[in-house]
């Protein structure tokens, strides 16, 4: 036990005062001249014993009163009952506040971030004026000690939500290192968090423990502002059949909903923005939840004109965390893609041309592709840059100049599809120029009968088959011959395989563009002259899978200039410009309506935007009313930032050094830890209460013993 003001212990010497008064005021016996002296002496002895007992009892109470008052004023404390730093040293305190989007969870009419800020401000008011204070959050800016407590309170009050927060462990480690630099101070870190499991992975806890081990004088207080039983609806990432549509192609959006401790089926609404950015409701669906708390809805719009379209999908049902109830999207409707089909003869391009742009369709404006055919012999005189994609059907050995022209087209951002057949020769195709496009060197022609069988449907060329993949009878369209590749290039990617597990469809990046290689031909008639067909993909019974597959492959090739249109908060946006489009400046319109003018360096072919911290739809425009450039993109919240599952506080505490970590669940706990850490646990209230009891007892007995007889 210690004392805040040990000098006041000298007051105990005042105990001599009641002793001195007792000796001076001692009652003297009276002398009586009375005949019956024996009776009087006996009575006198009994009275003296009773008076002596009363005097001693009052003397003890008065001595205890003075001594207790001196002890209480000395403010006794119990040491070692909690975390504490260096005795008598100034404080160096760092407050870490989790201000991620998840902290916008509302309970008792207050968000978790507001609750953390209120507790932090209450703590700041308890700190001595000489305390060095640092305020850290999950923004990516570095922090240092502030000037005074008022500045610290203002910084806490003005914290904004971070949609792209840095890992919480990084902020905690920075706080530990910051206070550890004050070697002559008591070093304390307060972490205000909802203790979400997403922020406290095993590696994060290990890193925090290591930081504490390297700074043994630092004490950390985990202030829990979370909710034990959370309730929430979450609108998960949207899924599109395609974000780049051709005129007349319908837009299909699928939205998934997850519920945690919520009842009822939520209503999901679809909004599209008009020319002024005003949201217009275009549909609504009820997401019927299954037993595991998930539901799914789909929207389809078929009347979108040319241009860039933006909108959002929203949950109409309210919940405690509204920030994950909206997902934003951007899609583009473009005119028919210009496709150049190259073949050795006219019949080579027939099947692919009819699959992409059927001649029986009278309304050509609704077609997704506009195909132009040309023979390889005349391809050198064609301007490839006028086309969105090139398709080489059963290419023969070509001249080095033509191969180089195709490679240059891909380097500048074009897309090339190679459908290999019987005209290919390993020696010619394994030269340097064609190997820039092919995924690897040609090895041999395989005659093992198999069939096309895609295993994974996550690639854009196969994504359209997900809803009916099990219903496609690929086995009735056998593949009799195909090309095998030797070792694949390091940047080649296998999109799909044949049933015997050999690569069938492969992709390889080429400069700013891409090249897709299909290992078997798609141009053979059912009975080619003098040889066997390579497959029955375009000539089998009702070859609708071939039509769907070719539309997916060529559609993917024709989208090369798009790039992604949806980003997560904080990601850098890359909008590639078409090869023939040059932009020197542009205007960026943010979700809040503000417009920023930006410049583009000369020769730059990609617009890069890094200011994407705000959620919503962005617009990039250039060229004035002529609309030379008018594109958009959307920014959404990362899914993990709305996960509310908590880590067990006791488990977290047990994983940290026991002599350096403490858990707090309320402001009272925080204030008590501050008192303990600075002065120990105070006993003044108990001591002064005991003094009051002794004083009252003394007064009661004194009145009783000294009252005069009537």
Image (cartoon, rainbow, N blue to C red):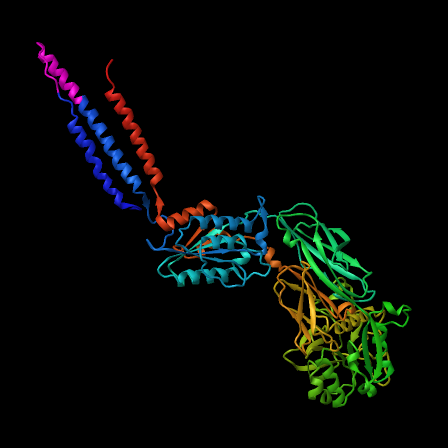
Given residues 33 and 254, the one toward you in this image is 33
Res 587 seen here? yes
- Please tell me whether residue 34 is drawn above or below residue 217 in the rendered image: above
What span is in magenta?
29-49
Is residue 650 rendered to the left or right of residue 312? left
Measuring from the top left, give residue 388's x and y in whole percent.
78, 76
Magenta segment: does it hold 393? no
Q: Position of residue 405 (x, y in %)?
A: 75, 85
- Where's the C terminus, which quadrant? top left
| Residue located at (26% from left, 45% from top) | 7
Residue under the image location 12 percent in, 16 percent down: 42
In this rendering, is residue 269 above or below 412?
above
Is residue 445 visible from the viewing direction of this image? no
Residue 32 colored magenta?
A: yes
Residue 576 x, y percent position in the rendering:
70, 73
Q: Residue at x 32, y 43 (%)?
A: 75
Q: Which of the 4 image quarters holds residue 706?
A: top left
Q: Is residue 397 left or right of residue 95?
A: right
- Image side of residue 488 versus residue 343, left or right: left
Quadrant of residue 350 within the rendered picture: bottom right
Q: Position of residue 95 (x, y in %)?
A: 47, 55
Q: Residue 37, relative to residue 159: is it above or below? A: above
What is the magenta segment's predominant secondary structure? helix
Q: Quadrant of residue 297?
A: bottom right
């Amino acid at each position: 036990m210690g004392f805040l003001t040990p000098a006041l212990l000298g007051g105990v010497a005042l105990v001599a005062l009641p002793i001195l008064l007792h000796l001076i005021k001692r009652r003297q016996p009276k002398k009586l001249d009375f005949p019956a002296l024996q009776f009087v002496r006996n009575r006198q002895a009994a009275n003296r014993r009773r008076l002596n007992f009363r005097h001693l009892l009052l003397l003890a109470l008065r001595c205890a009163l003075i001594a207790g008052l001196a002890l209480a004023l000395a403010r006794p404390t119990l040491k070692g009952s909690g975390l504490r730093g260096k005795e008598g040293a100034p404080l160096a305190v760092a407050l870490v506040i989790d201000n991620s989007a998840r902290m916008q969870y509302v309970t008792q009419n207050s968000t978790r971030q507001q609750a953390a800020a209120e507790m932090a401000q209450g703590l700041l008011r308890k700190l001595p004026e000489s305390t060095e204070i640092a305020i850290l959050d999950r923004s990516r800016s570095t922090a240092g000690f502030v000037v005074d407590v008022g500045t610290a309170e203002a910084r806490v009050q003005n914290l904004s939500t971070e949609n792209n927060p840095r890992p919480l462990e990084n902020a905690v480690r920075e706080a530990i290192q910051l206070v550890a630099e004050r070697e002559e101070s008591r070093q304390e870190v307060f972490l205000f968090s909802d203790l979400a499991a997403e922020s406290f992975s095993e590696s994060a806890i290990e890193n925090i423990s290591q930081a504490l081990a390297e700074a043994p004088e630092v004490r950390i207080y985990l202030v829990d502002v979370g909710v034990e039983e959370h309730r929430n609806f979450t609108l998960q990432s949207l899924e599109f059949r395609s974000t780049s549509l051709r005129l007349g192609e319908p837009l299909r959006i699928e939205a998934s909903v997850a519920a945690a401790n919520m009842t009822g089926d939520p209503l999901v609404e679809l909004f599209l923005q008009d020319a002024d950015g005003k949201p217009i409701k275009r549909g609504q669906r009820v997401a019927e939840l299954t037993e595991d708390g998930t539901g799914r809805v789909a929207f389809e719009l078929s009347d979108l004109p040319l241009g860039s379209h933006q909108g959002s999908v929203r949950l109409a049902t309210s919940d405690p965390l509204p920030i994950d109830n909206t997902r934003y999207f951007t899609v583009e409707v473009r005119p028919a893609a210009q496709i150049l089909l190259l073949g050795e003869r006219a019949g080579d391009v027939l099947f692919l041309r009819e699959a992409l742009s059927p001649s029986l369709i009278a309304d050509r404006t609704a077609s997704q592709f506009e195909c132009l055919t040309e023979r390889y012999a005349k391809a050198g005189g064609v301007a490839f840059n006028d086309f969105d994609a090139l398709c080489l059907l059963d290419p023969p050995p070509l001249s080095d100049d033509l191969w180089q022209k195709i490679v240059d087209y891909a380097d500048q951002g074009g897309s090339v599809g190679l459908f290999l057949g019987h005209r290919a020769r390993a020696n010619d195709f394994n030269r340097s120029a064609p190997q820039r496009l092919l995924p690897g060197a040609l090895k041999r022609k395989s005659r093992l009968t198999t069939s096309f069988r895609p295993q994974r449907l996550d690639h854009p060329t196969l994504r359209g088959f997900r809803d009916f993949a099990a219903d496609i009878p690929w086995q009735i369209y056998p593949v009799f011959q195909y090309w095998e590749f030797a070792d694949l290039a390091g940047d080649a990617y296998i999109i799909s395989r044949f049933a015997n597990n050999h690569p069938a469809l492969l992709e390889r990046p080429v400069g700013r563009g891409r090249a897709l290689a299909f290992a078997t031909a798609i141009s053979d008639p059912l009975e080619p002259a003098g040889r066997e067909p390579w497959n029955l993909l375009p000539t089998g019974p009702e070859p609708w899978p071939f039509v769907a597959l070719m539309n997916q492959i060529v559609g993917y090739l024709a989208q090369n200039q798009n790039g992604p249109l949806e980003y997560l908060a904080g990601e850098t946006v890359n909008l590639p410009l078409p090869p023939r489009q040059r932009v020197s400046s542009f205007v960026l319109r943010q979700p809040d309506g503000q417009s920023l003018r930006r410049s583009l360096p000369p020769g730059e072919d990609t617009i890069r935007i890094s200011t994407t911290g705000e959620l919503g739809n962005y617009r990039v425009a250039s060229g004035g009313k002529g609309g030379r450039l008018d594109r958009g993109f959307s920014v959404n919240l990362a899914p993990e930032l709305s996960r509310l599952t908590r880590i067990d506080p006791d488990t977290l505490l047990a994983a940290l050094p026991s002599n350096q970590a403490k858990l707090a669940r309320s402001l009272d706990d925080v204030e008590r830890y501050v008192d303990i850490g600075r002065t120990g646990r105070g006993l003044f209230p108990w001591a002064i209460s005991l003094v009051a009891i002794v004083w009252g007892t003394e007064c009661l007995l004194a009145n009783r013993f000294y009252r005069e007889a009537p």
